[in-house]
Image (cartoon, helix red, strand yellow):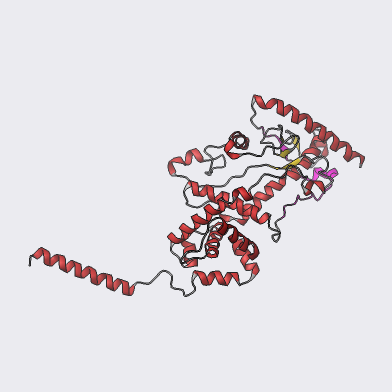
């Protein structure tokens, strides 16, 4: 036998023996007898409060969500049920767990967790047309209709608009372009103004932005132009004052800004609840940029799903100030002064909305003094 052939045979025998010994002594990563299915059943039949703490929703909502996803194409696989797939997804977005950590918890490989996470995420995004809908333009929100501070002055208000930052991760060579004025990267190239985001959404037919009809409008902050369909506060006017003698502006405008701000803050509290419920939004992990976008949309869909559920107490109410409006000086000196960029074509709409705001302010001031 040729020496080279002998050497090749010896190498093959040694490789075979090495593989046999390694297989016999190899310790699997998942050594617990408590499988992912066992964990799922323990949670489904366990304490209700614990379930809400882990998955951000009661069991009844979880069951309905699984039903919706099954209608949208999610199926049981050979090793995972629909319920277990949804639980793994909710654990990641609710607590910011990585795929590796979820794999340890559910006794599945990182690849399995990642594959099912992406599938559930895309299916939830597919529910967006059903659950992310424009407001009802025909009815007055109960928050306004049932509060004399806001009705009848804001009876044509259909909601509030604001922007929020969600940190994302982009390739190193793109980070400079995506870094915003607060120093972290976001999903829009450049340090973009809120007004520009709104303008892009309104001008692109693909977004189907729900522009308020007729005299209806959204409440916006001073970062937006005061134009048809969007009611902004007075700029250069205080919300609250510590000392009336320091009042340099118009008391009527101050009253309008005060009520406008207390009503518009509902959208900021919504952002707060949304981000606290889904901790992954504090910093979307190392996913491709498209997946990061889908995660944000999926979290918005889930939030609306919970808001529409009768068995979830997530109502957003306007916080009434502890002091009467006669004591507005007790607050901080919050002054509206940020200017939003405007275009020439907006000037007519701004003038029209400015007259509307002045008339509303005058009516509000007169009624307040008569009571």
What is the span of residues highlighted in magenta in the rendered image?
Answer: 315-339
Q: On the picture, is 353 further left or further right than 107? A: right
Q: Nearer the viewer, residue 84 or 365?
A: 84
Residue found farthest to the right = 370
Residue found farthest to the top = 344
Does 294 appear above or below 226? below
Residue 178 at x, y percent in the picture: 51, 40
Q: In which quadrant of the rendered view does residue 13 lie?
A: bottom left
Q: Can residue 211 be spotted in the picture?
A: yes
**Would residue 361 be counted in the magenta stretch?**
no
Residue at the location (55% across, 64% down)? 83
Q: On the picture, is 369 further left or further right than 160? A: right
Residue at the location (60% across, 62% down)? 55
Q: In which quadrant of the rendered view does residue 171 lie?
A: top left
Residue 194 at x, y percent in the picture: 62, 38
Residue 139 at x, y percent in the picture: 77, 45
Which part of the image, by quadrant, shows the N terminus?
Answer: bottom left
Residue 348 at x, y percent in the picture: 71, 25
Q: On the picture, is 365 further left or further right than 266? A: right
**Would residue 329 be counted in the magenta stretch?**
yes
Which part of the image, by quadrant, shows the C terminus?
Answer: top right
């Amino acid at each position: 036998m040729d020496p080279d052939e002998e050497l090749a045979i010896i190498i093959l025998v040694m490789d075979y023996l090495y593989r046999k010994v390694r297989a016999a002594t190899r310790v699997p990563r998942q050594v617990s007898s408590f499988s992912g299915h066992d964990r799922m059943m323990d949670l489904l039949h366990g304490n209700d409060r614990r379930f809400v703490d882990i998955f951000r929703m009661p069991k009844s909502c979880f069951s309905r969500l699984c039903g919706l996803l099954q209608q949208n194409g999610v199926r049981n696989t050979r090793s995972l049920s629909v319920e277990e797939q949804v639980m793994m997804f909710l654990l990641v977005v609710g607590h910011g767990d990585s795929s590796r950590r979820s794999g340890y918890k559910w006794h599945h490989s990182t690849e399995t967790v990642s594959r099912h996470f992406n599938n559930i995420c895309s299916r939830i995004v597919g529910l967006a047309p059903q659950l992310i809908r424009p407001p009802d333009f025909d009815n007055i929100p109960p928050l306004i209709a049932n509060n004399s501070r806001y009705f009848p002055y804001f009876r044509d208000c259909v909601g509030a608009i604001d922007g929020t930052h969600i940190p994302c991760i982009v390739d190193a060579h793109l980070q400079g372009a995506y870094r915003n004025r607060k120093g972290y990267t976001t999903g829009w190239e450049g340090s973009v103004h809120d007004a520009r985001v709104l303008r892009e959404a309104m001008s692109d037919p693909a977004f189907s932005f729900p522009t308020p009809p007729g005299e209806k409008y959204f409440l916006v902050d001073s970062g937006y132009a005061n134009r048809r369909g969007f009611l902004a506060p007075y700029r250069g006017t205080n919300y609250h004052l510590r000392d009336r003698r320091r009042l340099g502006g118009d008391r009527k405008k101050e009253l309008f800004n005060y009520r406008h701000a207390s009503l518009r803050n509902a959208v900021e509290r919504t952002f707060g609840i949304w981000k606290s419920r889904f901790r992954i939004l504090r910093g979307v992990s190392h996913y491709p940029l498209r997946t990061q976008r889908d995660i944000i949309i999926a979290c918005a869909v889930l939030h609306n799903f919970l808001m529409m559920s009768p068995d979830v107490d997530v109502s957003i109410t306007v916080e009434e100030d502890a002091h009467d409006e006669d004591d507005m000086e007790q607050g901080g000196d919050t002054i509206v002064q940020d200017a939003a960029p405007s275009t020439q074509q907006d000037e007519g709409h701004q003038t029209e909305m400015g007259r509307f705001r002045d008339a509303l302010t005058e009516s509000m001031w007169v009624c307040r003094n008569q009571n």
